[in-house]
Image: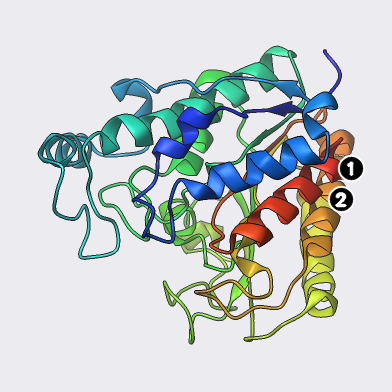
Amino acid sequence: MKDGLLVYDDELLSEYSFGNDHPFGPKRYQSFYKEYLKQGLDKLTRHARACSASEHDINLFHTQEYIDHVKKLSKIGEGYLDYGDTPAFYGIYEAASRVVGTTLDAIDKIMSGDTNRAFIPIAGLHHARRDKAAGFCAFNDCGVAIEHLRKKYNIQKVAYIDIDAHHGDGVFYSFEDDTDLLFADIHEDGIYLYPGTGHLNETGKGIAAGTKLNLPVPMYADDERFVKEWDKIEDYLHSRQPEFILFQCGADSIKNDPITQLNFTSASHAHAAKQLRNIADKYGKGRLLTMGGGGYNLDNISQTWCAVIKALL
């Protein structure tokens, strides 16, 4: 296995955006990349290019009817993929497919032994459901990744860890009754914030009841509260011993994000990344894929994602 963290530092990823006036715009990637170079992290990491997913890949998680819907609006270039959160634009199918394909490429490189850790800045689109878009997310690359790991590599015990301010509802409800999918999510309490889900008592359904961990925190929760909740995730992971870890490290849980109300700092995200690296080394041959997720304060994005990269080195 080659040493070093693999970073997908390809500007093509910034094409998954909704324009300069939208919170999820192309400057998110550009701000990160500028800081990544400024800190010299490009000299400490290995580099990879974005890739496109096939329709078959996307169909591992999403329904064919929904894929066809995205294709149609992608050609029209207007309207919404959902009920008002996720606008269509010319080429959104291709841009979203590239996010999915890049996530799958990272998994393939990790599973082949080319690397054991990777970071993708524009990835972790955790709101899309199997049959619909939601919350700026056209395709759910996290969900596709889980299905890909199972079908191609027979990895059943996948851990999905999410510290984005918004609950990873598209992943949670798609695997709510799945006993093998490890799910742990620290997020701003849904009483105050979209999507309004991820309550403490949502621990799985049916035979999977008690197998998931939702950890909502109140507005203005700080690093001290983060560590308190994070310790529960570590205990959970040690008890379940995941074979592969997917980590969504959305920077919208950092203080002064324009659309959320949490007061974490990049130290929380770096702490989570370091601990997950250690847990992956212990139980999963080091296999850890980190996805940038949300975040709409450009300085927060650049500082936090770079802090995560340093913690993964």
The percent coordinates of residue 159 (x first, y second) are 66, 46
The percent coordinates of residue 121 (x first, y second) are 60, 41
Question: For the image shown, how many numbered marks are present on the structure?
Answer: 2
Determine whether label 1 and label 2 are within 8 Å by CB. yes
Tell me if residue 90 can be seen: yes
Query: Disc 2 designates what residue?
Result: 275
Q: For this view, does 71 lie left or right of residue 171?
A: left
Quadrant for the C terminus, please: top right
Q: Nearer the viewer, residue 102 or 95?
A: 95
Q: Nearer the viewer, residue 230 or 256?
A: 256
The disc placed on residue 278 is: 1
The percent coordinates of residue 114 (x first, y second) are 73, 13
Please report the residue visible at 43 percent of the width from the left and 55 percent of the height from the top.
Answer: 24
Based on the displayed image, in which of its 4 quarters is residue 75 positioned?
top left
Please report the residue visible at 22 percent of the width from the left and 36 percent of the height from the top.
Answer: 67
Using the numbered discs, state the Cα–Cα distance from disc 1 to disc 2 in whole angstroms: 5 Å
